[in-house]
Amino acid sequence: MDEFQIIKTIFAPLAGEGAFGLTDDAAIIRARPGFDLVVTTDAIAEGTDFFAFDPSGSVAQKALRVNLSDLAAKGAVPHAYLLSLALPPSINADWLTAFAAGLAQDQTEFAITLLGGDTGRTEGPLAISVTAFGFVQHGGMVRRSGARAGDDVYVTGTIGDSGGGLAIYKREKHTLDEPQRDALLARYRMPQPPVRFGPALRDLASAAADVSDGLIADLGHIADASAVQLVLDADLVPRSDALRAFWGEEDAAIVRATTAGDDYQIVFTAAPNRHAEVMKAANYYRTQVTRIGRVEAGTGVELTRQGRALPVLRPGYQHF
């Protein structure tokens, strides 16, 4: 199929309101009085973020979900997205059909639709770029810059699982049983961003970021933007039983988990008198939320364990 056949046959069924069935050069997002439009974009590439042998449906879902993670961290509700594909010659119609099926599944789950994008050819590895749009009440977007000394630090979900899955893909030796191994591989292959919990941050969080490059690295963005120091208790950082069985309980294992990246959870700060409300929201949205530290005067991020500062040589994944 050529580009236009691909669009008409495979992607047009995913188009939503304002996309004109993907038959025009542009799309429309209708304004919502009293709301701001939040925009984010992320790209994933074969060999870095996924592998050629990964099912194309899960590749599609990862491409979309890494953007939904950003929207959730800003307190926004997903609305629509743009999709751009650079396809190598190895990609065929069957691969694209399964890719679109993965998108369709997530569109239903997260109430988001396709607006358009671009499809082209490349002689390099497959590359996928998504630009996602969401709505948040006017002035309600949660930024990185609101953390204040005395606030608590929280994180959703568990940290380090995706890094563990990647390590298994790279044939790191382990003694995990099959369910443990599969759980870590699944977290690398398909993120589980807390999309439904995200809007609760508007009323609770003083600052927030999604955990993509690594917990410590992304907390560092909050620290820099807010001009504060974030102090974490290593023993409170939530790690799954599977990751504990894989990497252990030593200091190095916790540092590795907090710097591995690709978690796509939310780290946020909130005033200490909001703790009960934070946990109530977590229970309501059935989202695991853990208090892992505090905000102090100072700069940067410090990871401590039983009164000791743990050395962190590389805070997270670096693209360059």
Image (cartoon, grey):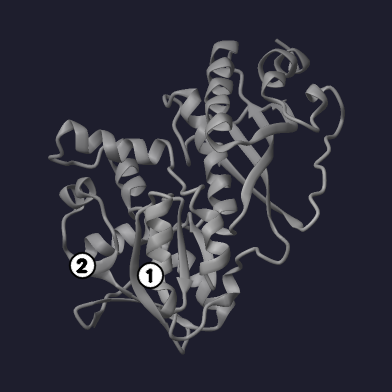
Q: Amino acid at mark 1?
A: Ala
- What residue is pinned by disc 1? 276
Does residue 204 lie above or below 5 as drawn?
below
- What residue is pinned by disc 2? 251
Question: Which disc is residue 102 wearing?
Answer: none
How crowded pointer 1 is (Cα within 10 Å; few <14, some 14-19, many 20+) is rated as few
Q: How many marks?
A: 2
The N terminus lies in quadrant: top right
- What's the residue at 75%, 31% (across, down)? 116
Q: Quadrant of residue 181?
A: top left
Q: Quadrant of residue 128?
A: top right
The extreme bottom residue here reads: 297
- What's the residue at 71%, 67% (across, down)? 139
Spot occupied by residue 85 in the image (x, y as percentages of width and height): 66, 30
Q: Amino acid at mark 2?
A: Asp
Tag in front: 2 or 1:
1
Q: Is residue 285 visible?
A: yes
Spot occupied by residue 199 in the image (x, y as percentages of width and height): 56, 56
Does residue 202 lie above or below 33 as drawn?
below
Does residue 206 lie above or below 150 as drawn?
above
Q: Is residue 125 visible?
A: no
Left or right, 42 with respect to 260, comes to: right
The C terminus lies in quadrant: bottom right
Q: Secondary structure at mark 1?
A: helix
Spot occupied by residue 131 in the image (x, y as percentages of width and height): 68, 43
Along the line of sight, which residue is nearer the eye, 251 or 222?
A: 222
Left or right, 280 with respect to 182, comes to: right
Q: Quadrant of residue 152?
A: bottom left
Task: Work out whether mark 2 precedes mark 1 in sequence or the reverse, and give the earlier one.
Answer: 2
Left or right, 255 with respect to 89, comes to: left
- What's the residue at 79%, 50% (across, down)? 32
Spot occupied by residue 123 in the image (x, y as percentages of width and height): 63, 27
